[in-house]
Amino acid sequence: MSSDTNDANYKFDHFKASWNKHFSSNQIGSSVSEGTKKLLARFWAHMMQETGSGGAVNESGCPSDAKCCDYNTGTCTTSTDSNSKYFGRGSLQLSHKKNYKSYGSEVHANENKFVGNADELGTGTFTEGSETASYRMDSGIWYFKHANMHRCYSDQSEEECFAVSIMKINGNLECVNNEGDSNGKQAKRFGYWKDARTALGLAAAGDMVDCHTHCQHALNTEGVNCWGPWSRRNLAAATVKTAYENLMSGDPKKEKSDQNYPWDDMRASWNKHMTKDKIDSTTKLASVSEDTKKLLARFWAHMMQETGKGKYISESGCPTAAHCCDYNTDSCSSSTNSDKKYYGRGSLQLSWKDKYSAYGTSLGTESKFIDNADALAVQSSYRMDSGVWFFKHANMHRCYSDQSEEECFAVSIMKINGDLECGKNKGDSNGKQAKRFGYWKDARVELGLVAPGDMVDCHTHCGCELKAGKWDCPDCWGPWWPSY
């Protein structure tokens, strides 16, 4: 951060004020400990990479380039006001609305401070004690600590710890989709780290550790070795509600009151059906039992798969596509009224007339959704509740005492989408199990559970065989499958 221009972007006095605020045990004073130097080297390396050694305040090309909308979840175009675009700004190029909100909430006691006012993060200053600090500098130091990029496991080398910190700041581009550092971005960041260590008088770093390999990436999911208890989520502060909202990111209306699967519907339905595992809007993850987290992870994984993370209310292509009649046992064609078609609707895409009838019975009227199927999708409480009901009704919440969690999850796949993902899908040839398993892994990590082991193929585990033209999977039903 050497030139006059760069100093104007990120003044040392602003850096010192923010660093000493966030790192009270590693303050910069007349002398600096080796431990503090290691933290500074790690932060400065990321800052040099993100800002071009201090030359950039905003992400390159923003606010006008199309990519500047990539961090928005709602409608965004090149003409959208820059204050409503959450592209990278500041010393670590803070991005995504949820991070702007977290920074506003945790540091400035105002969750909406930078919502609809994003440019302020790149331009504004504030008073920190007797010092002046800038949001652009402060936001990066906050994120560095918030994401636990300052911490290393006791059994990690410094090179491995740096690889983990790359995952936490730019995971997809530099780790997940970058095996062997094919795009060279890790090497550039690692070079900055070496430069910073040398400038601070630390020993030179060893060979670069590839974060893709170290984090054990597979199937484009987040690496199991690079989150653990020190992920960017503060489990002591995070709630079940925030975990749910983070996972259901596909809902195009997620920032509005008319979202497809509102949290309040999730909470109400879950507490109605899962009476021993109740949750609330303010329930902290740290206070939720491990068993309840396991149930939530399993349900949310299936919901993410079935609804595209909350995007879909009804099965894709319905009611007009030919496959929308596949769930009817009586006469059905493309012109049949949608109320008489029992294709997938709701949080677990409830399908087949007998299940619509059984769900209606659970509400006191067997015929409630018969020839009135659209009602299940139209009212948000039914669309959520039907899935939670089926999850318990089909005993997807239960595992046998001699099953591993991976085997139990395989059985739950059989119960929700047996033929397509288990019966005719030996070795997961269509990849649908792997996608569902990936969602399960995401949900477990979001809830602070350990990542699961290797995927169990439900076709093999369930003993699926083709008999008289139909798939029979006898090992995955047992006494816990409901009779309709």
Image (cartoon, rainbow, N blue to C red):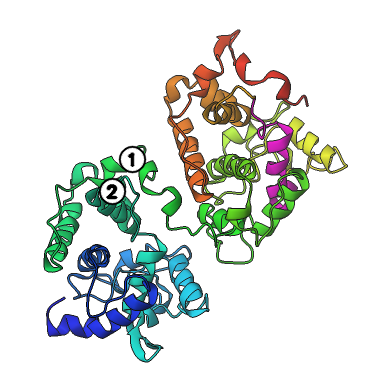
Magenta range is 374-400
| Whole-percent x, y for residue 227 in the image | 40, 49
View extreme (top): residue: 468
- Residue 389 falls left or right of residue 333: right
The residue located at (43%, 28%) in the rendering is: 430
The residue located at (73%, 27%) in the rendering is: 330
Amino acid type at image mark 2: Cys
Q: How crowded is the residue under tag 1: few (<14 C-alpha within 10 Å), some, or many (20+)?
A: many
Mark 1 or mark 2, which has the lower sequence index? 2
| Dot 1 and dot 2 residues touching (CB under 8 Å) | yes
Label drawn at residue 175: 2
Q: How crowded is the residue under tag 2: few (<14 C-alpha within 10 Å), some, or many (20+)?
A: many
Residue 228 seen in the figure: yes
Amino acid type at image mark 1: His
The residue located at (74%, 49%) in the rendering is: 271
View extreme (bottom): residue: 130
Quarter-wise, where is residue 342 in the image?
Answer: top right
Q: Judging from the image, what secondary structure is the residue with disc 1 in?
A: loop
The answer to whether residue 60 is above or below residue 396 is: below
Residue 379 seen in the figure: no
Report, in whole angstroms, how far the alpha carbon at label 1 lies from the one at label 2: 8 Å
Quarter-wise, where is residue 293 in the image?
Answer: top right
Residue at the disc numbered 1: 217
Residue 90 is a magenta residue: no
The residue located at (24%, 64%) in the rendering is: 46
| Whole-percent x, y for residue 264 in the image | 69, 59
